[in-house]
Amino acid sequence: MRVLGIVTARGGSKGIPRKNVQMLCGKPLLQYTAEAALAASRLTRVILTTESDEIAEIGKQCGLDVPFMRPAELAKDNTPSLPVIQHAVQFVQSQGEHYDAVFTLQPTHPLRLAADIDGAIDLLETTEADSVISFVDVGEKHPARMKFIDDGGHVIDPPFAEEFEGQRRQDLRPLYLREGSVYLTRTSVLMEQHSFKGQDCRAWIVPPERACNIDTPFDMQMAEWLITTGLGWGEPVQ
């Protein structure tokens, strides 16, 4: 199976300015994704799509291929991910390259492992699914424990509330939240169905300690703690 890895790194970011190149434990955030992708054995090629000259240069320093610069109209705050990925696929196809699947790699997930990448590709291949997407158990924040609160401050049970007050989480049906570090999709589903998920999506489960999505300064602090303590991945930073 030929799989194209596409690292998506836009220059603009409101929550954390220059987020994708901010330093995390001595390395640009982008470098964590680059290292995992380049260490994976099942990615045929890994490219970076960005409109930022700074990110492109840092990406190259991290070993990423930058075969084109992303058009500005695909780098706005409200630009969805799908057309960005489709643009990259169309570019490589115009160069005569064709891939069975595409792995979307967001730099905002620094705790992704090469094993996640290779394992997800193995799962896609063996199941013949349309896609593999990562999920994490919702844990204590199970929707069955959530409530509506009206304008008067009254607490109201939603239709999906627990069967009785104080029902043990272990007795609730497990639910999972889309995690974001793994988005692996067959190329035909991306380009013809215009979907990351398709009809047959399989789950790649990520443990809570590695389900880290960088969106705010707090997220950066949490990621730093997970890395330096060794709870996220690898050994503590020396």
Image (cartoon, grey):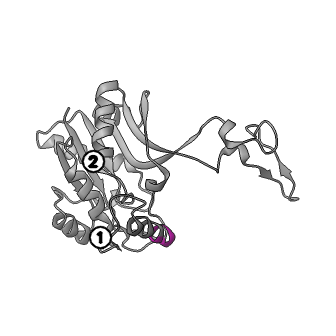
Q: Quadrant of residue 149?
A: bottom right
Pick whichever of labels 2 and 1 is earlier in the sequence: 1
Magenta: main secondary structure: helix
Q: Estimate how packed mark 1 is, as few (under 14), some (14 to 19) or many (20 or more) residues with alpha carbons within 10 Å.
A: many
Q: Quadrant of the N terminus?
A: top left
Q: CA distance from mark 2 to mark 1?
A: 25 Å
Q: Check disc 2 and report the residue beneath it.
A: 87
Q: Which mark is residue 168?
A: none
Question: Which residue is pictured at 25% across the width and 47% down the height?
Answer: 5
**Residues at marks 2 and 1 touching, judged by CB atoms closer than 8 Å:** no
Q: Which mark is residue 28?
A: 1
Asked whether residue 100 appears in the rendered view, the answer is yes
- Label 1 sits on a secondary structure element that is strand
Left or right of 178, for residue 187: left
- Give x and y (percent) for residue 117: 30, 44
* Relative height, residue 125 to residue 220 (above, below): above
Question: Which residue is pictured at 26% across the width and 50% down the height?
Answer: 6
- Give x and y (percent) for residue 11: 33, 67
Magenta range:
217-221
Amino acid type, callout 2: His
